[in-house]
Each structure stands twice: as C-alpha cells, then as structure tokens.
Image (cartoon, helix red, strand yellow):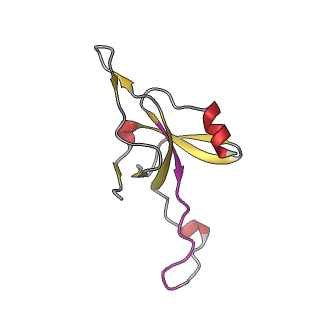
Amino acid sequence: MAAQAFKRFLPMFDRVLVERLAAETKTKGGIMIPDKAQNKVVQATVVAVGPGAMTEKGHVKPLSVKVGETVLLPEYGGTKVTLEDKEYFLFRDGDILGKYQE
C-alpha cells in the first residue's frame, strides 16, 4: 500500500520525505514512559527524495541522502504529509542535520 502512495507523491527539488521513528515507550529497565514524558523523535528514515536543487547554471545538484537512510532531524520544522493514513514529514535537504552510517 505505502509503495503505491509514493508512486503518486514525489518530493520536488531538494525536498526529502521522511517517516519518523517510533518514540521510546519503555526505559531500559522496563518502566513504561507516559506520552507527555516521551522525548520528541528526531530520527527518521528517508522514504522518498526529490531530484535535487537547480544551480544558477541550470545543473541539478544531487541530494546528500538516499532512500532507506536514517537521518537526524531538527526538533521543530518540516511539513506534515498524510499518505495512506500514515504521517510523514517533508524537509529540505539542507535542513537535515546528519545521517547515520551503517
């Protein structure tokens, strides 16, 4: 289902569509964390990318992330997008703070 949603929605220019990772609901010791005490999730998985930004000379500058990579996001920002009843966020490539190496 989600694959069909991404065929209909592609980010433009230097935009990156991400799915935030689930918030931790338990501590390492097994104690349940209430919703209000959970930290804001700043990690996400890249699910779709745009072709890249145009330079002044008309060339396309490729993005720094690829589909499937795990990235670090700013605490605030991004545009919420709902596809197939699932929440995703749209960020500019330059807004992404970093990516995790595998």
Q: Is residue 22 within the magenta segment? A: yes
Residue at the image point whose x is 43% and y is 52% from the top: 75
Assign the magenta stretch its main secondary structure: loop
Magenta highlight range: 16-29
User: Which residue sits furthest top?
Assistant: 57
Q: Nearer the viewer, residue 72 or 32?
A: 72
Does 51 appear above or below 95?
above
Residue 9: % across, % down: 60, 32
Asked whether, in this view, residue 8 is left or right of residue 95, the answer is: right
Does 87 appear above or below 23?
above
- The tally of labels here is 0
Quadrant in which the N terminus is drawn: top right
Q: Is residue 73 within the magenta segment? A: no
Residue at the image point whose x is 41% and y is 51% from the top: 71
Residue 83: % across, % down: 66, 41
Asked whether, in this view, residue 85 is left or right of residue 48, the answer is: right
Does 97 appear above or below 41?
above
Residue 8: % across, % down: 64, 31
Quadrant in which the C terminus is drawn: bottom left
Among the 4 quarters of the image, the one containing residue 66: top left
User: Which residue sits furthest bottom?
Assistant: 29
Residue 78: % across, % down: 49, 41
Residue at the image point whose x is 35% and y is 51% from the top: 99
Among the 4 quarters of the image, the one containing residue 59: top left
Residue at the image point whose x is 52% and y is 58% from the top: 21
